Amino acid sequence: MKNMKRIIALLLSVVMLLTLVACGPKEDNKGNEGNNDENQGEAGFPTMTWKLGASGGETSTWIIAGKYFADLISEKTGGAVTVECYGMDQLYGGNQVDGIQGVIDGTTDVDMHSNLIYASFNDKFSVVSLPFLFANTDEVDAVLDGEGGKALADILENEYGLHFMGMGENGFRHVSNNKNPIVVPSDMNNLKIRVAGSKVLMEAYKAWGADYTTANWSEVYTGLQTGTYDGQENPVPTMDSSAIQEVQKYVTYWTGSYDCLMFTMNGALWNSLSPELQAIVTECAQNTMEYQRKINREADEGMLAKWETENGVEIHHLTEDEMVAFKELSDPVYDFYANMLVTDCGMTAEEATAFLAAFGVEVTL
């Protein structure tokens, strides 16, 4: 009986040992502890969730494009990478500057903000919005897909540690107000216009005769509704996504100022990705920016028609002849900006001249 008990005890010990071995960590063929299936997508990429921040509202082309990017990335990675989109800078209490700081710090992973908000960090980004710099979107694409875009990407990557993924479009910034149509510069006199926080844009509206002010975009609708501001300036899709047409009577449609979007990723995150995943991100980001520009440019006509019929907004398309007076008043803004590159941005006269030349601007300093 005692021998039988010893045999049973021995058998139990063997079973327990085999169980421990079977349940222990599995090793891959390199001798390292392998990843569990639940940490890998179907395509073999690590599972990750990225936060994408933007200033545009839920129906803006910014967030529509962000969701498009999310779908592309999910498809290409077999569902391993999820992108969550947050509009109106909701992760930062509506503060657009904090939204950009978030992607620099890594609080958010992917970001889509305009050059004018980046100008709060560095006035070099204001160059895109010099008054009447571009006459049409063909000129925009030639510059921003060429030397101008490269110059901005270099600043993002070398001075802020961001990975530049592509150039999108906020668009030409049109001015609206509740007082009167704007056809000649004197029509802007005494109008309190909310403008984005760019020294160049402020200088332009000052030259045109407006009483400009700045405010977070999330505060503008209420400010227009209560009469704190008479008007504001923004591309049509941005206005529409925030229902600005509900609280404005007049819109002047022109090429007075342009605004691009820069699609970026936190630099540390980018550097942590495998070359295979980096290639996927690059492809998806480029496709996304092409899509975003396309839908943004197609949106204006339909939205303006809707504003006229549904909201009673009076829209004036400024003619080339009517723009001449505004362009003449804009000339000093170019000298102001060129000197600011030297005095505020620390560029030499030669560097400032070369930088502006990348955007088709000739100056003498």
Image (cartoon, grey):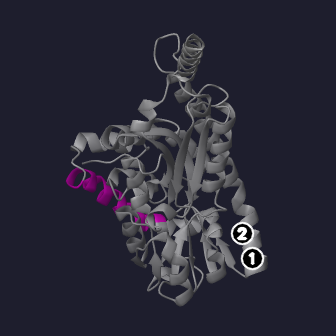
Q: Nearer the viewer, residue 114 or 50?
A: 50
Q: Position of residue 57 (x, y in %)?
A: 60, 64
State yes or no: discs 1 and 2 in contact (Cβ < 8 Å): yes
Number of numbered discs visible in the structure rendering: 2
Mark 2 falls on what kind of element?
A: helix
What residue is pinned by disc 2? 304
- Please name whichever residue, 208 or 4, is drawn nearer the observer in this view of the structure: 4
Residue extending farthest to the front is 1
Secondary structure under tag 1 reads: helix
Callout 1 crowding tier (Cα within 10 Å): few <14, some 14–19, many ≥20: some
Q: Between marks 1 and 2, how big is the CA–CA gap?
A: 6 Å
The amino acid sitting under disc 1 is: Glu
Residue stretch in magenta = 327-344
> Residue 225 falls in which quadrant of the image?
bottom right
Q: Is residue 70 magenta?
A: no
Residue shown at the point (76%, 64%) measured from the top left? 302
Residue 333's spot in the image, x, y percent?
36, 62
On the rendered structure, is 256 left or right of 290? left
Q: Badge 2: few (under 14), some or many (20 or more) residues near its Cα, within 10 Å?
A: many
Find out whether residue 338 is within the magenta segment: yes
Q: At 42% across and 71% down in the image, what residue appears?
A: 205
Question: In the image shown, does 347 or 35 lie closer to the viewer?
Answer: 35
* Residue 121 in picture, x, y percent from top left: 33, 55
Query: In the image, what residue type sits under mark 2?
Result: Leu
Relative vertical location of residue 261 with respect to residue 31 in this rendering, above or below: below
Residue wearing tag 1: 308
Q: Residue at x 30, y 60 (%)?
A: 336
Residue 249 visible to an observer of this rendering: no
**Which residue is found at the position 61% from the left and 75% from the top?**
244
Can residue 235 be seen at all in this image of the molecule?
yes
Quadrant showing the N terminus? top right
